[in-house]
Amino acid sequence: MKQDGFDCELLLSPADDVAKVQSHLAAGFSVIILSKPKGLHWTVLVPGETSDEAVIYDSLQPQPIRVDMKTYVQSSAISAILVRPAG
């Protein structure tokens, strides 16, 4: 990520750090989530219309999905990478 101009922070237990994920999304940044729908799978979480909502971009789904951010992170996220432009 750094070589492509991004700073990132790894959260090994995002369910225990939902406030940090929420704050990162509220600042307008994305989060890469390792989730567990059936096996392991990467998704991208972006800010929703409210601070409680997020939008999931998932290659297994035909359209983006709006979710309750806290519920999704606590129930599905194994780890998270907070991504933002470097600088």
Image (cartoon, rainbow, N blue to C red):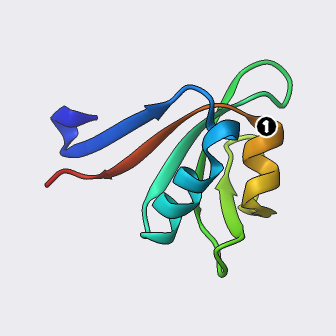
| Relative to 40, residue 28 above or below | below
Q: Residues within 10 Å of mark 1 (few under 14, many from 20)?
A: some
Residue 6 versus residue 51: which sits nearer the camera? 51
Q: In the rendering, at what x and y percent does residue 60 appear?
A: 75, 40
Residue 65 x/y as whole percent: 77, 61
User: Amino acid type of disc 1?
Assistant: Ser
Work out which quarter of the rendered image holds the N terminus and state it: top left
- Asked whether, in this view, residue 24 is left or right of residue 57, the answer is left
| Count of numbered tags | 1
**Residue at image x 25%, y 45%?**
6
Q: Residue furthest left?
A: 87
Is residue 64 toward the left or the right of residue 28 in the image? right
Query: Horizontal placement of 35 versus 84: left or right?
Result: right
Write down the quadrant of residue 7 in the picture.
top left
Q: Which residue is mark 1?
A: 76
In which quadrant of the rendered view does residue 17 lie?
Answer: top right
Q: Nearer the viewer, residue 77 or 5?
A: 77
Residue displayed at 50% across by 62% down: 23
